Amino acid sequence: MIKKLKQSLLAAALAALCGHTHAADVEVLHWWTSGGEAKALAELTKKLEANGHRWRDFSVTGGGGDNAMLLLKTRVVSGYPPMAAQIKGPEIRDWAEDGLLADIGDIAKAGNWDATLPTVVANAMKYEGRYVAAPVNVHRVNWMWINPEVLKKAGVEPPASWDALIASAENIRKAGFIPIAHGGQPWQDFTLFESVALGVGGADFYRKAFVTLDPATLQSATMTKVLDTFKSLRKLIDAGANNREWSAATALVINGKAAVQFMGDWAKGEFARAGKQPGRDYLCLAAPGSDKAYTYNIDSFAFFRQRQDDARKAQADLANALMGAEFQENFNLAKGSIPARTNARMDRFDDCAKRSAEAFRATAQSGGLVPSIAHRMAAPEAVQSAMQAVVSSFFNDPAMNSREAQTRLVQAVSANAPQR
Ligand code: GAL
């Protein structure tokens, strides 16, 4: 629907493209508003300002980017796209297909991006073989963030399986803590769900369900087990979770109120910001059962076509800044992720980041590397959001059982997937 609306207003949008942009104004849409995210973003604004540009912040609160993407559409259809926007995964191709994105192939060629980026990252940035987006990082989503003090006080070991976590919930609660720190927002429900799917079903199952979108896999007994396990976790969440931001949930782990959080490693940006050390104040472990797998989430920026030379120059500076080795190092130290560039220096990074880099390499070889569905990397946008809605309703509606959720997941795919 939104896509149709977008298309019908495409001509108007193109006609109005950026006649209004001041030479040195770089307006960038993003959703990095938490403490750790803002600290990471400051590295970028610093860089751009050092190049003589003026940063015009277009930030939209709401983790996961659902709000930001809605607002982006509104801006584009009214004829005022920003200069660049945080756009990820298959959506990069959608925007390029609509003819709205600038081809930055020459910048990429001059910077030797093909040789500098892992294939999986480079491919996600291209449309018809040409770069239309620049990556800054790789986030691992299938992490479990633990407060070891809380587990100790509850007399509980770090959970090796989802069932072990469910079984220990009673003890964690009795000791006065929340078992799982969570924010009741659809994208956070979906983030937890994909880690359960990966841990219970494994990488091949995950790929068939969320990349191939295979109806038989969505209806399989394994998916029933995934959904049953996922639903059992609902009881491990506190009553205050409703609509809580993800960073507030991370704060519950940081401040010793909750035992664990399942979240991508942008959560580490919050621990770092609070001065916490991994291994001492908190632990990063792969979500139960998913040690040999890796759900990747690449943050990237796409550039809206510009008419004026100075605006194009500013875009080139932005693209080069995003791919700078030193920038990626500083940015990712604050963000919790690892640089998108291969062979990045990792000596200033903590143990969690080093393990992420190692697992990223190893799983690319083993077949355990899969795109995050909750973070818009795996499926077309319409499918992703329809599946997210099903998963979130299922999680929060005590009356919906796993079989019904499976039927709805299959419908979410068949009603929204492009014809193949
Ligand atoms: C993800 C994004 C991350 C992160 C998170 C929470 O989708 O890729 O960079 O910050 O949302 O806002």
Image (cartoon, helix red, strand yellow):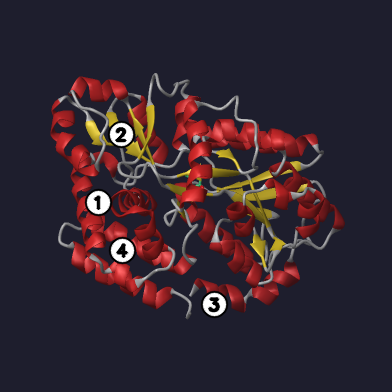
Which tag, 4 or 2, sits closer to the chain's start? Answer: 2
Check disc 3 and report its element: helix, strand or loop.
helix
Residue, disc 3: 4
Q: CA distance from mark 1 to mark 2?
A: 15 Å
Instruction: Examine the image and state in which quarter residue 166 appears.
Output: top left
Q: Nearer the viewer's eye, disc 4 or disc 1?
A: 1
Task: Identify whether 288 is placed above or below 373.
Answer: above
Residue 62 visible? The answer is no
Q: CA distance from mark 3 to mark 4?
A: 23 Å
Whether label 1 touches label 2, CB < 8 Å: no
Query: How many residues crowd mark 1 within 10 Å: few (<14), some (14–19), many (20+)?
Result: many
Which tag, 4 or 1, sits closer to the chain's start? Answer: 1
- The amino acid pointed to by label 2 is Val
Query: How many residues crowd mark 3 within 10 Å: few (<14), some (14–19), many (20+)?
Result: few
Check disc 4 and report its element: helix, strand or loop.
helix
Q: CA distance from mark 4 to mark 2?
A: 25 Å
Task: Identify whether 43 is placed above or below 405.
Answer: above
Residue 260: mark in rendering: 2
Q: Nearer the viewer's eye, disc 4 or disc 2?
A: 2
Give the number of callouts: 4
Task: Identify whether 184 is placed above or below 47.
Answer: below
- Residue in the image at 39% along x and 77% along y: 415
Which tag, 3 or 2, sits closer to the chain's start? Answer: 3
- The amino acid pointed to by label 4 is Val
Whether label 3 touches label 2, CB < 8 Å: no
Mark 1 residue CB less than 8 A from any atom of ligand 1: no
